[in-house]
Image (cartoon, rainbow, N blue to C red):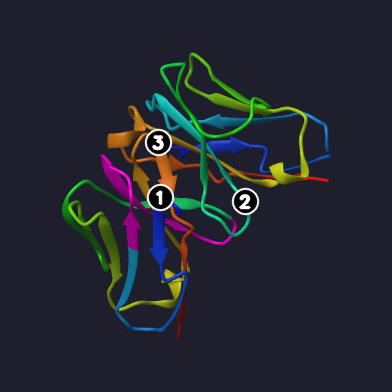
């Protein structure tokens, strides 16, 4: 079993829909990152969380330390949000989930 | 300000060869980490360096080695290349040891081993 599990693996949405991507982890962590990776490989850090909730524009990230679970929400999704979203946790090292491929159709 | 830079962008090698990948962190960042991302998978941690010292190593064979220079740039070396080493190699920098600091990723070096 992977230390970091993401769901769903693939997600297709229509423009304007509310998106939720989930991340569960099995190790003790000091921080959790949500990352965005576009085709070609470039990775951008979206959020770093150790508790509670953070919001940036249309993106919201939450974490529940007791339940070892985090969610990334995208409100009013847009085709430019199409990318791979990766959850990564800092335990003894940064461990990544497999990623969620999001496609938003116009 | 320039972001994290990596060179080369693409590289093709044959089995058994050796390769050196380079990373320049954001100015002022003291920590550099290296990751391997095989196509279709999430990145895997290889090394972390902080203030020129190795601070973490992932589950990779001794064919993988790295170092950090006084200007905080870093090199990743891979010896005796195998087909399975074909991947995107990502470098990330952060101000301090990465656990509590945002990581900034470079564009990656895509290595193909034939």
Quadrant (top left, top right, bottom left, bottom right) of the C terminus of chain A: bottom left
**Residue at 34% in and 60% down:** A23
SS at mark 2 in the image: loop
Disc 2 is attached to a residue of which chain? B
Q: Chain of mark 3?
A: A
Q: Which residue is nearer to you in this view: B108 or A93?
A: A93
State whether residue A82 is above or below residue A69: below
Taking the spot 68% from the left edge, 27% from the top edge, the residue there is B63
Asked whether the beta carbons under mark 1 and mark 2 sit within 8 Å of each other, the answer is no
The residue identified by callout 3 is: A93
Left or right of B44? Residue B81 is: right
From the top left corner, tell me how far across and down residue B3 is, in percent.
Answer: 46, 39
Q: Does residue A37 belong to the magenta stretch?
A: yes
Mark 3 and mark 1: span between their CA atoms? 11 Å
Residue at image point 40% right, 40% down: A94
User: Which image quarter is the N terminus of chain A in?
Assistant: bottom left
Tags 2 and 3 on a common chain? no
Percent across and percent down for residue B32 are: 46, 29
User: What residue is at 46 percent from the left and 16 percent from the top?
Assistant: B52
Question: Based on the displayed image, in which of its 4 quarters is residue A35 positioned?
Answer: bottom left
Which residue in the structure is indicated by mark 2?
B38
Q: Chain of mark 1?
A: A
Q: Which residues are magenta?
A: A23-40
Disc 3 element: loop
> Where residue B76 appears, x then y in whole percent?
61, 28
Mark drawn on residue A3? 1
Closer-to-camera residue (A32/A79):
A32
Asked if the residues shown at circle 3 and circle 1 are in contact, with their CB atoms under 8 angstroms apart, the answer is no
Measure how far apart labels 1 and 2 are at the Cα level. 18 Å
Q: Quadrant of residue A79?
A: bottom left
Q: Earlier in the sequence, mark 3 or mark 1?
A: 1
């Amino acid at each position: 079993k992977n230390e970091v599990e993401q769901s769903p693996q693939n997600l297709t949405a229509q423009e304007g829909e509310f998106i939720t991507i989930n991340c569960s982890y099995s190790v003790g962590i000091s921080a959790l990152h949500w990352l965005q990776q576009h085709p070609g490989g470039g990775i951008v850090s979206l959020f770093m969380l150790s508790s509670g909730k953070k919001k940036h524009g249309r993106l919201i990230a939450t974490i529940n330390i007791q339940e070892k679970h985090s969610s990334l929400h995208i409100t009013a999704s847009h085709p430019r949000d199409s990318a791979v979203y990766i959850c990564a946790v800092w335990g003894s090292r940064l461990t990544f989930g497999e990623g969620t491929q999001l496609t938003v159709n116009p | 300000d320039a972001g994290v830079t990596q060179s080369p962008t693409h590289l093709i090698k044959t089995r058994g060869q050796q390769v050196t990948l380079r990373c320049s962190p954001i100015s002022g960042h003291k920590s550099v980490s290296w990751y391997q991302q095989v196509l279709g998978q999430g990145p895997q941690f290889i090394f972390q360096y902080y203030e020129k010292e190795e601070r973490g190593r992932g589950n990779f064979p001794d064919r993988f080695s790295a170092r950090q220079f006084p200007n905080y740039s870093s090199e990743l070396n891979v010896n005796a290349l195998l087909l399975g080493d074909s991947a995107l190699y990502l470098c990330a920098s952060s101000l301090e040891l990465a656990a509590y600091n945002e990581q900034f990723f470079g564009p990656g070096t895509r290595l193909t081993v034939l």
